[in-house]
Image (spheres, rainbow, N blue to C red):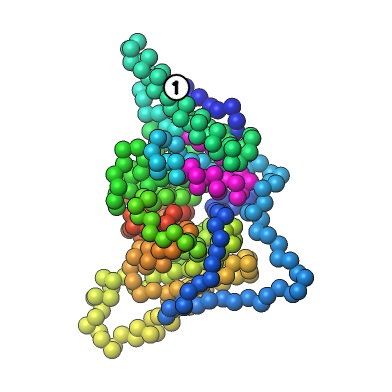
């Protein structure tokens, strides 16, 4: 039977805000030199005496109860880092934080001795989550943090939690995970079919840049871009930084296949067409959120490789994930999650490739 903490409800009323909105409180910075294929959008400065309103996500005095930010908790350093980011996100949104530990222990048909051991394991888990929640509450304030130890596999528990959450935060791997390029089974399983955006933290050894600035978003030029861009614009606005919209227009394999065409192929014309495609995908967003400076970057490369390279110094990389009938991650999502050196927000999209 699940044990709940004294503070915070499991699920609150439906959030009126866009469930994909992400935020953070790191500062922005000036962009570097503009490479070929990149465009910047400049906006007129406001008149003297005019004060630009703060983005809505900076408010902490929320009048409408929100769905929680949910983080999985275990004894690993990766989980502790995930909780720290979840605290940051909840504080920015004025949202409650919910911490959950999944206890994969057979609760039925146990012998007396095994039952005593199971009870000890549960008490240990409750102590861990309660202690973690107390630290989070010290940062967020009283009544902002709830916790629960739930029976079940971590992937199943977190997917169920996602149905009532606005955001899930998980580490790339939990207790007993391996370092390197391997994505933990829990993180991969949650991303595969989560009903809400999932932020996956990279392995700490993969983090290369310390002075992080932009939010980077992958734009395909296909249906679903609107959902991904909504998350990315909100994240950039809340962080007070710029947004780099990246569109990779050619797969390396396609490039190899057409090398024999030589001058017959109008690559400049293709580049112009892909730049127009990106601009059209962003059309209207500049008016919706004029406070966010946008840079457009069109790259002739594999999508995953282009996104990882563009996000080397980013605070956050935002990508979409189309659910596959074959129950697997798409090549771009898979590649990004395995190689990115910054947190990756994966936005679930309907349909399949």
For residue 122, side relative to residue 251 (left or right): right
The residue indicated by pointer 1 is: 123
Residue at position x 34%, y 86% from top?
266
As drawn, which residue projects farthest toward the top?
112
Asked which quadrant contains residue 294, the reply is: bottom right
Total numbered labels placed on residues in the image? 1
Q: Position of residue 260 (x, y in %)?
A: 22, 83
Q: Position of residue 346 (x, y in %)?
A: 44, 53
Q: Is residue 71 visible?
A: yes
* Residue lying at 38% horizontally and 56% vertically, measured from the top left: 207
Where 341 falls versus 121 (above or below)? below
What's drawn in magenta, residue-wise? 82-100
- Front in this rendered view, residue 8 or 239: 239
Q: Outermost residue toward the front? A: 210
Q: Main secondary structure of the magenta part?
A: helix
> Is residue 226 positioned above or below 19 on the image?
below
Q: Nearer the viewer, residue 204 or 181?
A: 204
In the displayed structure image, the side of residue 177 where residue 222 appears, left or right: right
Query: In the displayed image of the protein, which residue is found farthest to the right?
Result: 49
Observer-nearest of 34 and 324: 34
Residue at 51 percent of width and 29 percent of height:
130
Q: Does the magenta-highlighted stretch encompass residue 249? A: no
Mark 1 closeness class: few <14, some 14–19, many ≥20 residues within 10 Å? some
Q: Secondary structure at mark 1?
A: helix
Query: Is residue 166 visible to us here?
Result: no
Residue 172 rendering spot, x and y as whole percentages: 37, 47
Q: Position of residue 144 (x, y in %)?
A: 61, 37
Q: Is residue 98 above or below residue 149?
A: below
Residue displayed at 45% across by 45% down: 81
| The C terminus: image quadrant | bottom left
């Amino acid at each position: 039977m699940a044990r709940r903490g004294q503070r915070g409800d499991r699920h609150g009323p439906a959030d009126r805000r866009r469930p994909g909105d992400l935020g953070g409180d790191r500062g922005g910075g000036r962009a570097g030199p503009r490479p070929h294929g990149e465009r910047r959008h400049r906006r007129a400065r406001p008149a003297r005496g005019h004060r630009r309103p703060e983005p809505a996500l900076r408010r902490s005095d929320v009048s409408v109860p929100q769905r929680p930010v949910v983080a999985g908790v275990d004894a690993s350093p990766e989980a502790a880092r995930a909780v720290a980011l979840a605290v940051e996100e909840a504080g920015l949104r004025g949202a409650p934080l919910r911490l959950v530990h999944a206890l994969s222990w057979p609760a039925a048909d146990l012998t007396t001795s095994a039952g005593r051991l199971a009870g000890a394991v549960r008490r240990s888990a409750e102590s861990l989550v309660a202690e973690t929640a107390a630290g989070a509450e010290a940062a967020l304030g009283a009544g902002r943090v709830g916790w629960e130890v739930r029976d079940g596999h971590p992937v199943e528990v977190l997917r169920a939690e996602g149905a009532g959450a606005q955001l899930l935060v998980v580490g790339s791997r939990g207790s007993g995970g391996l370092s390197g390029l391997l994505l933990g089974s829990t993180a991969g399983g949650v991303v595969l079919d989560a009903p809400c955006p999932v932020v996956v933290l990279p392995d700490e050894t993969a983090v290369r840049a310390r002075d992080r600035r932009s939010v980077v978003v992958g734009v395909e030029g296909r249906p679903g871009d609107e959902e991904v861009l909504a998350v990315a614009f909100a994240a950039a606005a809340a962080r007070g930084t710029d947004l780099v919209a990246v569109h990779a227009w050619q797969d390396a394999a396609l490039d190899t296949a057409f090398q024999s065409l030589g001058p017959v192929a109008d690559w400049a014309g293709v580049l112009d067409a892909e730049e127009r495609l990106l601009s059209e995908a962003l059309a209207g967003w500049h008016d919706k959120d004029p406070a966010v400076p946008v840079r457009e970057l069109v790259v002739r490369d594999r999508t995953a490789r282009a996104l990882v390279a563009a996000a080397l110094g980013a605070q956050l990389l935002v990508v979409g994930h189309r659910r596959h009938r074959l129950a697997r991650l798409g090549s771009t999502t898979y590649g990004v999650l395995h190689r990115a050196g910054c947190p990756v927000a994966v936005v679930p999209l309907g349909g399949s490739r």
